[in-house]
């Protein structure tokens, strides 16, 4: 089943458990997804992804973080349908498969204080 995204690209709406864990494997993707869950944007609201991710961790280069977000992390989340990302405007919102990853992201957020530093 396909759905239209912001950029009118067809996306697959069904994500597997492997897709969910692959999406959560990177700390920037986890930060982005947790922030999206907390902010709870709807399909008609858009956010700037570069404002959602904390790239100030010791040793991080903010330019490199932006490049990685644009070329790796945002496309991966978008391809799985977890986010709807417009490459031209840079805006994003929850995607057609958000419901597949949201319960796991909620568990991370709700247990943030009990989890090891840097996990969320």
Image (cartoon, grey):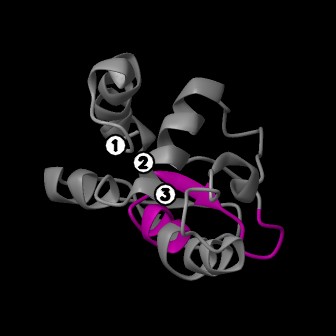
Q: Is residue 103 magenta?
A: no
Magenta part of the chain: 74-90
User: Visible in this render: residue 40?
Assistant: no
| On-image quarter of the N terminus | bottom left
Residue 28 tag number:
3
Distance between the alpha carbons at the discs numbered 2 and 1: 8 Å
| Secondary structure found at label 2 | helix
Location of residue 89 in the rendering, given as x and y in whole percent from the top left corner = 83, 68
Q: Camera-side residue: 117 or 18?
A: 117
Question: Are there few (<14), some (14-19), or many (20+) residues within 10 Å of tag 2?
Answer: many
Residue 31 tag number:
none
In percent of the image, x 27 and y 29: which residue is there?
A: 115
Question: Are there few (<14), some (14-19), or many (20+) residues within 10 Å of tag 1?
Answer: some
Residue 119 tag number:
1
Q: Camera-side residue: 11 or 85?
A: 85
Residue that numbered label 2 is attached to = 30
Does the CB distance between marks 2 and 3 fall below 8 Å?
yes
In percent of the image, x 43 and y 70: which residue is there?
A: 76
Distance between the alpha carbons at the discs numbered 2 and 3: 5 Å
Does the CB distance between marks 2 and 1 fall below 8 Å?
yes
Q: Camera-side residue: 86 or 2?
A: 86
Outermost residue, front side: 58
Q: Is residue 76 magenta?
A: yes
């Amino acid at each position: 089943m396909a759905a239209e995204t912001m950029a009118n690209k067809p996306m697959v709406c069904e994500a597997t458990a492997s897709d969910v864990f692959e999406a959560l494997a990177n700390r920037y993707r986890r930060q982005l997804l947790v922030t999206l869950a907390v902010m709870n944007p709807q399909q008609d609201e858009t956010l700037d992804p570069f404002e959602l991710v904390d790239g100030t961790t010791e040793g991080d280069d903010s330019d490199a973080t932006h490049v990685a977000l644009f070329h790796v992390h945002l496309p991966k989340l978008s391809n799985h349908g977890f986010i709807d990302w417009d490459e031209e405007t840079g805006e994003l919102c929850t995607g057609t498969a958000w419901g597949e990853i949201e319960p796991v992201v909620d568990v991370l957020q709700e247990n943030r204080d009990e989890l090891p530093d840097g996990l969320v």
